[in-house]
Image: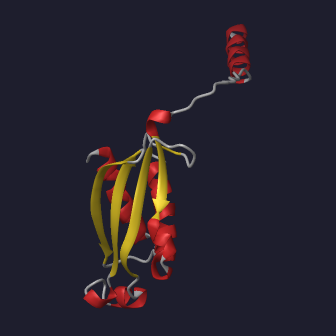
Amino acid sequence: MKNIASLLVLAFFLASCSGAETIVKKKWDAHENTLALVDLSAREDGFMDAGARLVNALEESLADTVFVLKSEQPRYQIKFKVTKYQEGNLLTRLATMGLAESSRAELQVKVALFEGKTMVGAWEVNSWVKGGVSKNALFKKAAKEIVDHLKGN
């Protein structure tokens, strides 16, 4: 009985000390799903910051999709322009629990999807937040709407 226990302990010890290493070398170019983000609102002073924050939120949202962000020779381009941005008042939102319309943060974006130089589709995103502490919640919500539209949801 003692020998069997020793063999079992030895087997578990040897199994726990083993491992595997895999090295995969491949050159993969997903040209079918490449996508570039073009912020057209960067030229306007009032919406420059809003456009940059929307680009960051879009990059985060697109990480969970089949689209690959690529700035050189992409198949698709998302061109967007922030047409309205109102940051709202965070303290008023918290104090009134989102009931005051004046404290509401709003973002309005015109979006167009291009394949090469041909426009495939265009739509407008109206996003607003009545509550919440995060300043980026508004941009994450707008980015989610844009990505959902790309997915066909």
Q: Residue 75 location in percent, x, y?
A: 45, 41
- Give me the residue at 29% from left, 83% from top: 98
150 displayed left or right of 22 = left
Is residue 138 depicted above or below 147 in this figure?
below
Q: Nearer the viewer, residue 7 or 63?
A: 63
49 displayed left or right of 76 = right
- Give me the residue at 49% from left, 50% from top: 36
- Give me the residue at 40% from left, 63% from top: 80
- Give me the residue at 48% from left, 55% from top: 37
Q: Nearer the viewer, residue 5 or 138?
A: 138
Residue 15: image quadrant is top right
Q: Quadrant of the N terminus?
A: top right
The answer to whether any part of residue 39 appears in the image is: yes
Q: Residue 108 location in percent, x, y?
A: 32, 72
Residue 61: image quadrant is bottom left
5 displayed left or right of 104 = right
Q: Residue 104 location in percent, x, y?
A: 32, 83
The answer to whether any part of residue 100 appears in the image is: no
Residue 124: image quadrant is bottom left
Q: Nearer the viewer, residue 80 or 13?
A: 80
Q: Residue 18 location in percent, x, y?
A: 72, 20
Q: Nearer the viewer, residue 28 or 80?
A: 80
- Total marks shown come to 0
